[in-house]
Image: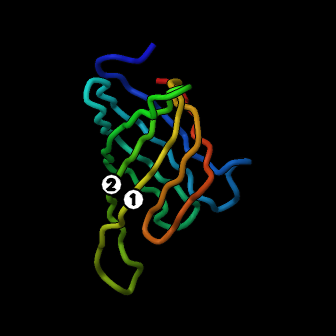
C-alpha cells in the first residue's frame, strides 16, 4: 500500500561495501508529499577534511516506475556555501544533486554529486523516522 498524505523519511546514502576512509557521508531527512510527489528536506554531507561538514536544504520530486514492483525514482538538488581557504577571502555556492531508486520502504541504490565530486553505486538505507 502506498503512503498517503505527508510523511518523513531518514536516509543514509553510502558507497556499496561500506564507507571508505576519507569518503563523504550523506544523510537525508526528507519530507514527502505523497499527493503531488514533492520532496523537501535537509541534507548533511560530512567528510573527514577541514571544513568538511555541510548542512543544506534540498528539494526535488518523486516519479513512479508504475510497473512490476513499483520503484520510486527520487531526484534532489540543492546548494551549500563553501569558504575558500586562507589567505583568500570569500565563499561560493557548491551545487548538489542526487538520484535515488528506492522501494516503498525507501531502500535501494543511488548516486550523488557535489561540486566536481561524484559518488556512484551507493546503497540507500532507510534509518527510520
Examine the rendered structure and indicate whether residue 42 appears above or below residue 91: above
Quarter holding the N terminus?
top left
**Residue 124, image x and y in percent?**
57, 40
**Residue 99, image x and y in percent?**
46, 49
Examine the rendered structure and indicate whether residue 76 appears above or below residue 29: below
Residue 81 falls in image quadrant? bottom left
Examine the rendered structure and indicate whether residue 85 appears above or below residue 120: below
Give neighbour class at mark 2: few <14, some 14-19, many 20+ (Cα, 10 Å). Answer: some
Q: How far, Cα to Cα, is label 2 from label 1?
A: 5 Å
Q: Nearer the viewer, residue 124 or 74?
A: 74
| Disc 1, SS | strand
Which residue is pictured at 42% across the width and 41% down the height?
74
**Residue 92, image x and y in percent?**
30, 72
Outermost residue, right side = 17
Per the image, the residue denoted by label 1 is 96
Per the image, the residue denoted by label 2 is 78
Which residue is pictured at 51% across the width and 48% down the height?
26
**Residue 128, image x and y in percent?**
51, 24
Total marks placed: 2
Residue 89 falls in image quadrant? bottom left
Give neighbour class at mark 1: few <14, some 14-19, many 20+ (Cα, 10 Å). Answer: many
| Disc 2, SS | strand
Question: Of the residues under marks 2 and 1, which one precedes in the sequence?
Answer: 2
Q: Are marks 2 and 1 in contact (CB under 8 Å)?
A: yes
Which residue is pictured at 33% across the width and 40% down the height?
61
Outermost residue, left side = 36
User: Residue 119, which numbered label?
Assistant: none
Which residue is pictured at 30% across the width and 22% down the height?
6
Examine the rendered structure and indicate whether residue 111 appears above or below residue 95: above
Residue 29 falls in image quadrant? top left
Outermost residue, front side = 67
Amino acid at each position: 500500500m502506498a503512503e498517503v498524505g505527508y510523511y518523513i523519511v531518514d536516509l543514509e546514502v553510502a558507497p556499496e561495501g561500506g564507507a571508505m576512509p576519507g569518503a563523504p557521508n550523506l544523510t537525508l531527512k526528507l519530507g514527502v508529499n505523497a499527493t503531488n510527489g514533492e520532496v523537501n528536506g535537509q541534507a548533511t554531507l560530512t567528510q573527514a577534511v577541514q571544513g568538511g561538514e555541510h548542512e543544506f536544504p534540498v528539494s526535488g520530486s518523486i516519479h513512479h516506475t508504475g510497473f512490476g514492483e513499483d520503484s520510486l525514482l527520487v531526484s534532489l538538488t540543492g546548494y551549500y556555501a563553501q569558504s575558500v581557504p586562507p589567505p583568500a577571502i570569500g565563499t561560493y555556492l557548491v551545487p548538489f544533486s542526487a538520484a535515488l531508486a528506492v522501494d516503498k520502504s525507501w531502500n535501494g541504490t543511488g548516486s550523488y554529486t557535489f561540486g566536481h565530486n561524484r559518488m556512484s553505486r551507493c546503497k540507500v538505507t532507510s534509518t527510520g523516522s
